[in-house]
Image: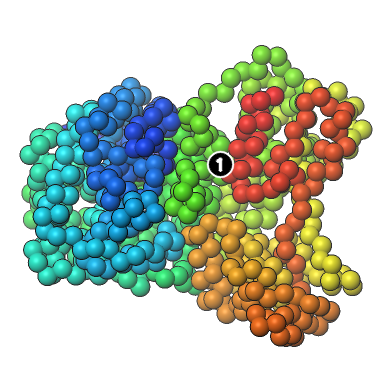
Amino acid sequence: MNSKYPLLLSPTKIGNVELRNKTVMAAMGMSQSDNGFVNKAVINHYAERAKGGVGAIVVEVTCVDTPLGLNTKNMLVIDDDKYIPGMKELADAIHKEGAKCFLQISHTGRGAKRTITGQQPVGPSEVAMPYTFMMGLGNETPRALTIPEIKEIEEKYAQAARRAKEAGFDGVEIHSVGYYLGQQFLSKTANIRTDEYGGSRKNRMRFHVNIIRRIKELCGPDFAIIVKAPAIEIGTYGGISIFDAAYYFKHFQDEGVDAIEVLAGMWSSEGGKKTQPESAYPDCQATILALVMKIMIFLQTGRKKKVHLIGGGRAQNPKAAEKALKHQCDSIFIGHGLLCQPNLVNLIAEDREDEIRPCIGCGHCIDHQLQHGGKAICSGNAVLARGDNDYTIIPAKEPKNVVVIGGGVAGVEAARIAAIRGHKVDLFEKEAKIGGQMNLAGIPPYKQHLQLLTPYLERQLELTGVNVHLGTEATKDQILSLNPDAVVCATGVLPATFPLDEDGVTINAKEVLKGAKTGKNVVVIGGGSIGCETAEFLAAQGKKVTIIEMQAELASNTGKTAQTILLGHLKGNHVTMLTECKVRSLDKTKVTYLDKEGQEVDIKADSIVLAIGDKPNPALYEELKDSIKEIYNIGDSNKGGIIPTAVYEGYTVGNRI
């Protein structure tokens, strides 16, 4: 065991459930069930994390009341005994690998979508779920639940817990954060009832108290109960103060709840100037842990029983986690870090921290489900929610000489996997550094976690024995002289050109990020993610920036969470955002464009930045494809796309060679 982290790696207890260490995998929806049933993909997903050393796993959000309680089509379900056999397989698989498991039970309430449920959503009151930049979701006004309906749902929570116990789970977690029904009852802006379920803290808490008491009746004292709840609900629509939370948590403790996982609820119509996207969250988020510490102080007075407090937020950094455990919480929850690196805890215990694949905070795991109706995907982990979640890498039957051209994320992943399988791999990168476009992606404000990826890629190439040739732009003759059995082209993109720029006055956005100088008045042509991030980069330097975009929406090619926060930053930095506008001409002093009404408008420009989208560069692939029997074209040189797609292509090709 790594002695640097004695607290993190030492045993603990939640109620009467003994954990081998103080790490808890937070529940994260994956949307990969078969109509609510546990399948092989679900079992493999959690078994891999249990095998990876985590102390306890809170299995993802699971619906207690279909269809009204669903938030995605492929959400896990536990509202009928028919789901018990699959849940038993899941619990057994987790226990087999040494971790304890809790099932997160939930109802989406007013957050449900009619397109999924076929019905009007329900909630404590007729108050629509507000827009939240964390989820990018607004919703129709719900129907207020009647008291008999509330009592029926309470019983459904309790029966879900009974089924979890029969399936072999060690406990349940009542989900009461975000847009789920639990938080809706606790919030005085979502819950404006005047009957026994609203109007006072005691009444708003009644829903939870009734559920907790009934679970204890059905499941007994040794079956652990965790409540996941906000210590504060902040933002435009905030309805839970720190004092409300302290009142709730103290009563949960007195009712015999074994643990509370503490978060902060966040509602806002947009991300403000100071709002940070996940790509900039601090390790072991100071906000959450400060709230946990305040709650800990509140709970220390007059308590009947010490409740176990679980805190965290970007806790894959063991140094930050160890520090938090000294003063701020009893266990650490780890979320996206375990999606990205399933054996994260084992790597920490084995003093192999430099091998941990970092979560870059891109948000695709959330957005791909809630915005696109798909499964969770990851920019670092190609296996996540793909197929059966099988992490087995099969050695090659016959080792080959493999050449990979391009050291971006797609090329490195292909080289890494091919080398692990036993192939001899040479990788050529024309720049002096591995990383490709990721090295630029981490430059704009609030993108610092993207900078963590390049050291990881470099270390992986070193560990897997890939022969890396930096500062070498590979040619056809050079590649053929190596007599490769297989070639992978991951040669990236060509810089965009602009037909109207006859005099060459524009500057490519990527050159600006590299340090090219610009004047005081800057016009950015192109409002995709690169254009908007470059605009933010320039505005942060005090420049007067204008974005001109032909489409109706800016940064539409990024996830909804990141998009909303980014647009909030642009607004806060007084960036002029012109949509549905078309550039007509430009010169060294101005840009002329057509506005929405078709009128010509001139805008002063000391510098004009081009961000209209680069083009794939498959030239070397085209040169080689008739000379190499086994050749692949992946990543941006193929058709481009988001980072998870590039990593998945690299992983797939590395396994195919």
Q: Left or right? Give the position of 440 relative to 312.
A: right
* Quadrant hosting residue 646: top right
Above or below residue 121? Residue 80 is above
Q: Choose between 149 and 257: the one closer to the eye.
A: 149
Above or below residue 598? Residue 642 is above
Q: Choose between 542 and 569: the one closer to the eye.
A: 569
For disc 1, the neighbor class at 10 Å (few under 14, some 14 to 19, many from 20) is many
Residue 524 visible in the current orientation: no
Report the residue at 54% width, 76% height from top. 571
Report the residue at 76% width, 49% height from top. 616
Q: What element carries label 1?
A: loop
Q: Quadrant of the N terminus?
A: top left
Picture coordinates of residue 388, whole percent (x, y): 47, 29
Picture coordinates of residue 263, whole percent (x, y): 32, 55
Residue indicated by mark 1: 380
Q: In which quarter of the image is the C terminus?
A: top right
Report the residue at 74% width, 19% height from top. 400
* Quadrant hosting residue 414: top right
Q: Choose between 622 and 227: the one closer to the eye.
A: 622
Picture coordinates of residue 391, whole percent (x, y): 51, 27
Report the residue at 19% width, 38% height from top. 161
Above or below residue 557? Residue 435 is above
For the residue marked with disc 1, what is the amino acid? Gly
Picture coordinates of residue 507, whole percent (x, y): 79, 68
Q: Left or right? Give the position of 32 relative to 358.
A: left
Residue 630 visible in the current orientation: yes
